[in-house]
Every structure is written in C-alpha cells, then in structure tokens.
Image (tube, rainbow, N blue to C red):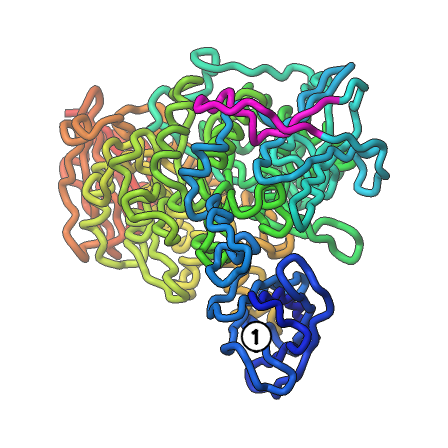
Amino acid sequence: MPDYQVLVHYHNPTDDYLSYNIWQWQENQIGKEASFSNFDYFGRSGLVTYQSETNLDYVHLIIKKADWSSQTIDYTIRLLPAHLVTEVWILEGDHQVYYSRQAAITSHYYKYRDPHAFDMAVSSKEFDRHWGYQGSLGAFYQADKTEFKLWAPTAKAVEVVIYKDASNQASVWKTISLKRGRDFSTDHTKNTIGVWQGSISEDLAKRAYQYRVIFDHEEYLTRDPYSQATSPDGKRTAIVTDQERNPLGFQVKQGQEAHWRVKNACQAVIYEMHIRDLSQSESSGVTPAYRGTFLGACQTGTTNGTGQATTFDHIRDLGVNYVQLQPISDRHKDYDENGQVTYNWGYDPQNYNAPETSFSSNPSDPAQAIRDLKTLIQAYHDAGIGVILDVVYNHSYSTFDSPFQASVPDYYYRMNPDGSFQNGTGVGSETASEHEMFRKYMIDSLLYWVKEYNVDGFRFDLMGIHDVETMQIIRDELDKVDPRILTYGEGWDMGTGLLPQDKAKKDNAYQLLDIGFFNDNERDAIKGAEVFGTLKAGFVSGQGTENIIAKAILGSSELGSYLMPNQVVNYVEAHDNYNLHDLLEEFHPHDDLETLTKRIELATAMNILMQGLAFMELGQEFSRTKLVATGPNGQVTQADKERAMNSYNAPDQVNQVDWNLLSKHQDSVNFIRKIIQLKTTRKEFSYSTYEEIYQHVYVRHAQTNSGLIIFEVKDKKHYLVVFNASGTPYRLENADQLKLIVSNNRRKIKTEVENLTASVFEILA
C-alpha cells in the first residue's frame, strides 16, 4: 500500500498558530485530524500521510482551529509520485495552494512579502537582465589545479564536496567554499555576480565532486549541471583528464575535412538505432562482453546464425550515410533484482553532457564511457557515415533530483504562478529554453558534443517545446562550426508556456531555416497511423491517400510552411509506435509472408524516394518486429500489442534486434540497399530547392482510390517511378523504352509491375 506524504507549511499573518491543526481526507474516505509538528520560517509545518491501495493524483486538507470555530477553504493538493514528498505552502486568507516557497512569499497574505521572490519564473527577462552570464561554467582540470564555476545567483553560499574516488559509495575527501563574483556588467560575458567560483591546487584526477548549494531555508547537494563524466549512478560529477578522454586514432574534423557529412542534406538517409537494441541479442554475433554497448555498436566481422553480416557491417553495407543514436546521455537508471540496469530508451536524462555509463565496457570507470563513445563515432566516420545524437533538452528525468533546480530553484523550468511545474511534454516538467541561462546551456551542450565528440547532427525530442529564437541561435552557432551539421526534430504542438508563434513547431517552419521537421503527413498517408489508441490505414493498405503522397513526392511544400526541402524529414517507422511490420500485420492478419513483406518494402521505398531527407529505423529493411507473444498457446495479447506500440521500458526480448530475420528477408535488404543508393547518389531524388523540384519532377498519376502513383524525374537522367498498391498488376506503356533500375517485383515480367511494388525505370527514349 503506497503512502503519500504531504509537507504542509502554514502561514497566519496574525501569528495565531497554537490552536490550529489539519483536517485531511481523500475521495470516498472519512477525514481525520493531523497535527503541526514544527515552527519554521513560514509559520508552522506538519507532515501528513495519506494511504491508498491505488495510485492517487489528488488529496484534500483544511487548516482549522481544533474546535472548528475557524477554518480555511477546502484545499485540493496535486500529489507527486508516492516515493516523493509533496511540499505545499498555504496562507490564511489566500485560496491558492502554492507548490514553491518562492511563489508563496509573493502572496499579499504573507506577512513578510517579497514581490520579486518569484521573478526568476514569472519575470525571467528582468531576472536575466540582472543575473545573466555568458562565460564558461563547470570544472576545469589541470594536473596541479582544478577550477570550479557554478551559476547560482540566488544562493547564499556554495561549497564543493570532493570525494576520494568516482565510485557511488566513495567517502568525502575534502570540502571547499566558493566565492561569489563581484563584477556587475550589462555585458554578460563579464557579469559575474551570480557566479560562484574557486579552485583547488591539487591533482583531482579520478575523483568526483558535488556542489552543496545553500539558501536561506534549505540546501541541496547536487552534481554539476555541466558534468562531462559521472559516477556509475550519475549522481556525482567525475573528473577525468584530457589523456583519459581520447582513444587511439580519434580525430575531430570539421568543415571540408569532415568528408562524411553530405553537402546536400536532402541526400541524407538517416538510420535510427538504440545502442542496446543493436547488439543485445545473441543473434548479433557480437562478443558477449560488448553486447548492448558502444563498442558492440562498432564491432566488425559479426554475423548471425546463417553467416550474414550484422550490426556495424550490415549498416555499412546497407549504404545509409547517417546513423541516429537514441539518447546516449546519462539517464536515470533503475536496477533489477540482480543489480542489472533495466531497459530504458533514455528519454529521462540526468546529465546532458555525459555519456550513459551502462553503455560502457567498464561502467565503474567514468572515462571509459567517453572513450568507448568516441571509438564508435570514429568507426562510423571511417566508414563514411555521420553520427547524429537524439537530444532531450525539453525535459529532465525529474525536478526533485535535478542540478538545475538545485542550483537555481524555479528558474530552469517553466512554472505556473502557483509554483507548480508546467508539463507540456506530458512526460515531465518542461524546460524554459527562452530563459537566457537554459538557452546558454543548450548551446554550450550542443557545441560541446560537436567539438569534443565530432558529432554530425542533432535530433531534438519534442522540439515544439523549445522557442523559435533559441532554435534559430542554435542553428547559427552550429553554422559557425559547419553548416552541414544536421538539425531536425519533432515539431508537434505541445505545451502552453509559449505563444503559438514562438514554438519551434512544424507550423512555424518558415521561421526556422535549415531545421527539419518529421513529416507525419507523409507518414500517415503511406503506412497509416496510430491515433489515440485507434488505427488508421494508409496507401499500402488500400487507403485513398494518393493526393497527399503526390504532394510529398514534390517535397511536401503544400503540407506545411517549409521554406526548403531540407526542412522535410520523411519517415514511416521510428522508435515510437508500431514498427511497420507490426502495424501492417495488424491491418492484414491474413497476409502470407510474401505479401506482408512486399507491403513493408513498398512503404520503405516510397519513403526513401520522396523529396527531402529520408529516415528509417534499425531493422525496418528486414521486417523487424516488437510483437512478442506472451499469451496462452503463443497468442498475442492486448498487453503485447500495447507494449510493442510503446516499448520504452520493455525488456530486451521485445526491443533487441533479431538478426536471424535476415535469413528470411535478404531480398528485401538487397532491394532497399538499391533504393538507398538512388537517394544518396542521384540528385533526381534529392533536390535542394523547391524550384528544382517543380522544374524536374512531374506526377503523372495519383488518382484517389486508384492505388497507383506514377511520377517522372527528368534531369541528366530520366526516371519513371511506379508505386502500385492497386490490387492488380500495372501494365507498362512503351516497356521497350524502359530500363529497369530497381524493383521488388517477384515475377520479373518486363511489361508489368506487380501489386505492392515500387519500381524505378530509366526512360531511354
């Protein structure tokens, strides 16, 4: 039975406390009295416990005199999860429940009111104008000295607690006090009044540290927001030397030296993968010690049970020019009964600049994760493949365990006037990118990944949570390093903290030049979609979406406010929702293997050949599935389906790639490889401007409900492309003037293309 604890702070401006207590209750239960236990800075406080056999979202309380001669209104309290204490501030006469001390003391009912105490949240521009800082932050190691710098303008004191080593259980070695800067300037590169700094003239290599940040009525022990390496659990910042960071052969190259970066973003074929998924299965052929790790993701010479190349060799041979790694930053970790880290995609970041230790070949050595990740990146670069990171700046794992909230409470996250956190992400509190210092943090972090790890691009999770101006500045800063660094993200309209025109969402693409958006219009038209628990079919399942697909063939300019085709990221499968195989099997449970496979091939080929960037998920080309039957007699249960749709924390048997599927789908792989080659080598499928598209691409046939789409591309070469989902073969006109380039036709009849096929011809006449 979970216990929910609420710490109640009560303020009475008349200082009449002795006769007051708390009446607590929850829905459908009889209430009971609870007592205040302490006097504190606010008035009185007491810890109230609510018990429930089910999860609770809300509880209720009243502050009253013991004899009920006086009482407040009924207060409804929004609860944190059961393992956390919900802290609230209540003021006599004020009907508002406050979830932040700083918000509470702005109340007119507070005896010692400070109207500016919550400015960091509700008047952030003015707060930033006074306290903003644009200099370096973090720890700066030298063999004989380490300097520490933390931005904490509202703190009263800051200490650095240094541990004997970087293990989770290491004891304290030394504590030093930092000094607040004294220089105020409207030039924020010089404005040090909010910065605490100090140094230790000793060699701190292989040690770890935390900051103790002290405020008027509370203090926090937290890691450095700028951590680059951590203890295995991510709770302490580890100090590593420059020599420890770089594996043999690692090189950072920018500009023209980074030859693997494509000049035309529209020729990018991006291959999304999760580090653990890629090699966790025995079928990967990866050395057991490296399975599910950075090194497993770049091991060469691996094969499945039938001798087909897997993992790194498979990706290289497939011909994609970018891999996108699902989050590799340090994340919150849970452990199973054996002490092993449980599965999680990683969209719950703890430390944005530190690699995830569970992907390391030696998690107990903080520097090993850095070296292993750099080894991976170098291997892909040597193979001519760029590396894109999936970054999750829109929220952190939590606010209660966040170095942001601990160092500057109520600043880095968007807040409501009552002191609660906004939650436009739906998965946690949303960060405030429009605030100067979180904007600075995002920019610093991205540039660190580029300059330290030689990363080639970024996919922004829930990018619509961020503001337009921040994304524009990010793009400008990356351009200074290399304009070919890719930036794209999820442009969904989420959250209420920004005005609609200020959100970096798809509708505002016209404000975000050279930033791409996932094209869900094209996705839904080709394969269908899962919409709030219901399924909607697409073209490959007989749905009449030809008109939308015709627009997508022409770069989707009519499907959004795009300025350039490089803002369009076409996809039909990603980590979210059903895999293509699983969705189409749901739509067509009676398909034989060949028919189902052809549907997948058709959808994948269509997606790649659209104008704009192409995106696909690991294993899409060989019918990867996440449907693992757990029902009686091998039946797929509803729970199995729901887990396949959202497998972020499902066990390995769901998420790991079964590389033995290659033996059933080698023909599919060969077909998709040829399609990818067209995209990456032929400008006819990757024009960089809409002017070029309209000049060279012509849709001949896209009649609604025909199941047939035909288009031509005429440039140096003249191509005819046929997508057939009509249910019958399509007879070719002037077949003798056509040279087949690639097709997934099984029967090889020269005068026709089969149902559920994608065929590309060169027109010779």
> What secondary structure is marked by label 1?
strand
Write the residue at 31% across / 37% down.
568
Magenta span of residues: 178-199
Residue 428, percent from left and from top: 52, 54
The residue lying at 62 percent from left, 63 percent from top is 86
Residue depicted at 52% across the width and 77% down the height: 72
Q: Residues within 10 Å of mark 1 (few under 14, many from 20)?
A: some
For the image, the number of numbered tags is 1
581 horizontally vs 25: left or right: left
Question: Would residue 162 be found to the left or right of residue 555 on screen?
Answer: right
Residue 287 sits in which quadrant?
Answer: top right
Q: Main secondary structure of the magenta part?
A: loop
- Kind of residue at disc 1: Val
Which one is nearer the viewer's eye here, 303 or 692?
692
Residue to which mark 1 is pinned:
59
- In the rendered image, the residue lying farthest to the top is 257
